[in-house]
């Protein structure tokens, strides 16, 4: 009986020991549960595919108490650019990576690691493809119970009321190639329930300006009016031209202001007026700071740019005065045709055809390059190409380059008889504008014909005078004259010229009739040559 009693006692002790052990395990478990965080912390990222050195945001949202103890955890391959407390329940981190790979951003809360988001960093080309696949933001949800989806943060929640923003502008605008390049204004309208006692505050706007344009600045007048009595408090301009606008408190339901823009005329800028084209869609967009409900007000406006491509080529034929006219210099110039709306041209090309029997003796490339094919038997095709833009700002090709292309053509006696004129030569012009899908633009062609050919004397001299331009100014006509003198001799001639004197005077050669009402006019100059024979 004693042994049975002893045995029962041992069994009872064993059972008690097991119960105590289980109880102790339960106690430990309860204590652990009390010390672990029970928070709802959400770690999100709008992008999971980015390029190298591209800045991306990681947003952390949760209770105020939890975020006080929260610490961000990230690998050394990522660089923390900034940390910003949006509000007591929202922290925004900005990162960037300098190498490719997959990197995870996690969180630490009371020494417990919270699941984060994985960011894939690729080179620029691969990142562009990845962005297309990255249609929806990815997030980690550290919650014991899955709640409703938290709205994705797209900016700073600092607007005190709900509001809408509307951007408007004219539907069409003309290109101007004159001195006063045309710009146009945008009107920004803020609609809200604001009034004098319930004001709309904390509104920041970001305006993206159309390519090739900038904010107007006319002395003290800016394209955006600022100040305490204006809708706009202040603004800043980023390097890419984007304008950051801070508004004053709004006390009315509809508030409006304007943004005046003008073309960038500096040809050295990355985007400027010379990159525009007829029919181009100019897009302006504006995005506001996030409202209290999470809405991001935004608006976009498209304006169509209209311009023309009316250009003409001018071809002239010149020979030395007193010569046989068998050596003709053809010169080529280009200009717009009477308008201020000419779009800047690209790939300007001139094509001239010289008849069989003639000989191209020389050429002047000027601001481009001649490509000459053919021969005396079949005829010549001469193509001149310009490898830079041609501006439609009223300045001709000669003004923009300082010189013009030319060809010197000889018409031999055995192919072109005396008392006849060389065949007319027609030059054509083609170009493109900046529209990548545009067709070739044809300019107005031009023709020129040299004077009557002759055999003439072996040695001769001649003089030529002509008016180049007439300018009306202050009630008077100012004329620009060109006087050419020449001595032409065969290379085997015994005659030579050492001095040539050209004289023009008001009181000689009948000039007094024309020049008397204006001023006393007389000039005389001497050109010295050294044993010149032609």
Image (cartoon, helix red, strand yellow):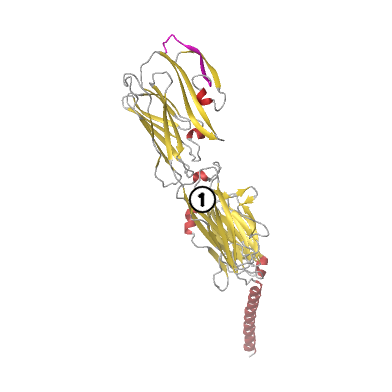
Q: Position of residue 55 (x, y in %)?
A: 58, 54
In this rendered view, identify the residue nearer to me: 53 or 273.
Answer: 273
The answer to whether residue 496 is magenta is yes
Element type at mark 1: helix
User: Is 397 placed above or below 87 here?
Assistant: above
Task: Tell which of 370 and 12 is nearer to you.
Answer: 370
Residue 57, x across and y down, in percent? 58, 59
Report if residue 55 is visible in the image.
no
The residue that mark 1 highlights is 124
Question: Seen in the image, is 324 located left or right of residue 36?
Answer: left
Locate the N terminus and report the quarter of the image it occupies: bottom right
Q: Going by the picture, which residue comes out furthest to the top?
A: 494
Would you say residue 178 is visible in this rendering? Answer: yes
Residue 84 vs residue 420: left or right?
A: right
The residue sitting at 62% across, 88% down in the picture is 4
Position of residue 268 measured from the top left corner of the image (x, y, whole percent): 55, 41
Structural crowding at the residue carrying mark 1, measured as other residues with C-alpha within 10 Å and reported as few (<14), some (14–19) or many (≥20): some
**Total label count?**
1
Q: Is residue 379 magenta?
A: no
Q: Position of residue 376 (x, y in %)?
A: 33, 24
Q: Residue at x 47, y 58 (%)?
A: 133
Question: Magenta part of the protein: which range?
Answer: 491-506
Considering only vertical position in the picture, is 313 above or below 514?
below
Q: Relative to 336, does residue 7 appear above or below in the rendering? A: below
In the image: residue 338, left or right of residue 357: right
């Amino acid at each position: 009986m004693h042994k049975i009693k002893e045995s029962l006692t041992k069994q009872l002790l064993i059972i008690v020991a097991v119960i105590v052990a289980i109880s102790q395990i339960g106690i430990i478990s309860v204590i652990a549960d009390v010390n672990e965080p029970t928070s709802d912390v959400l770690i999100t990222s709008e992008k999971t595919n980015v390029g190298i050195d591209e800045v991306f945001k990681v947003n952390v949202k949760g209770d105020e108490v939890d975020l006080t103890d929260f610490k961000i955890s990230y690998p050394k391959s990522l660089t923390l650019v900034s940390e910003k407390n949006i509000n007591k329940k929202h922290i925004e981190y900005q990162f960037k990576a300098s190498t490719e790979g997959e990197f995870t951003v996690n969180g630490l809360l009371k020494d417990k690691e919270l699941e984060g988001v994985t960011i894939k960093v690729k080179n620029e080309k691969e990142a562009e493809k990845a962005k297309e696949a990255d249609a929806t933001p990815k997030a980690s949800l550290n919650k014991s119970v899955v709640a409703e989806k938290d709205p994705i943060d797209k900016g700073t929640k600092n607007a005190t009321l709900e509001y809408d923003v509307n951007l408007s502008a004219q539907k069409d605008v003309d290109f101007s190639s004159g001195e006063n390049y045309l710009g146009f204004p945008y009107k920004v309208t803020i609609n809200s329930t604001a009034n004098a006692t319930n004001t709309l505050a904390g509104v920041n706007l970001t305006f993206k300006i159309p390519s090739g344009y900038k904010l107007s600045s006319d002395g003290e007048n800016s394209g955006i009016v600022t100040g305490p009595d204006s809708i706009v408090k202040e603004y800043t301009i980023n390097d890419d031209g984007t304008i950051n606008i801070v508004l004053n408190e709004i006390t009315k339901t509809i508030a409006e202001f304007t943004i005046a823009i003008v073309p960038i005329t500096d040809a050295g800028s990355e985007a400027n007026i010379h990159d525009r084209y007829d029919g181009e869609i100019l897009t302006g967009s504006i995005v506001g700071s996030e409202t209290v409900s999470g809405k991001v007000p935004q608006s976009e406006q498209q304006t169509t740019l209209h311009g023309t491509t009316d250009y003409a080529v001018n071809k002239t034929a010149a020979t030395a005065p007193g010569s046989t006219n068998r050596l003709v210099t053809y010169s080529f110039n280009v200009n717009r045709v009477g308008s201020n709306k000419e779009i800047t041209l690209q790939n300007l090309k001139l094509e001239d055809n010289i008849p069989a029997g003639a000989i191209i003796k020389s050429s002047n490339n000027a601001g481009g390059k001649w490509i000459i094919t053919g021969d005396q038997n079949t005829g010549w095709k001469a193509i001149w190409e310009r490898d830079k833009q041609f501006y439609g700002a009223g300045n001709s090709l000669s003004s923009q380059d300082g010189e013009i292309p030319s060809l010197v053509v000889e018409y031999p006696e055995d192919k072109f008889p005396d008392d006849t004129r060389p065949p007319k030569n027609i030059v054509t012009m083609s170009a493109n504008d900046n529209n990548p899908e545009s067709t070739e633009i044809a300019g107005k062609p031009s023709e020129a014909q040299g004077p009557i050919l002759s055999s003439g004397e072996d040695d001769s001299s001649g003089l030529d005078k002509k008016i180049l331009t007439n300018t009306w100014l202050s009630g008077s006509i100012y004329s620009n004259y060109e006087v050419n003198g020449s001595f032409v001799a065969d290379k085997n001639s015994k005659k030579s010229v050492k001095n040539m004197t050209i004289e023009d005077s008001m009181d000689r050669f009948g000039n007094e009739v024309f020049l008397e009402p204006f001023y006393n006019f007389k000039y005389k100059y001497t050109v010295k040559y050294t044993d010149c024979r032609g």
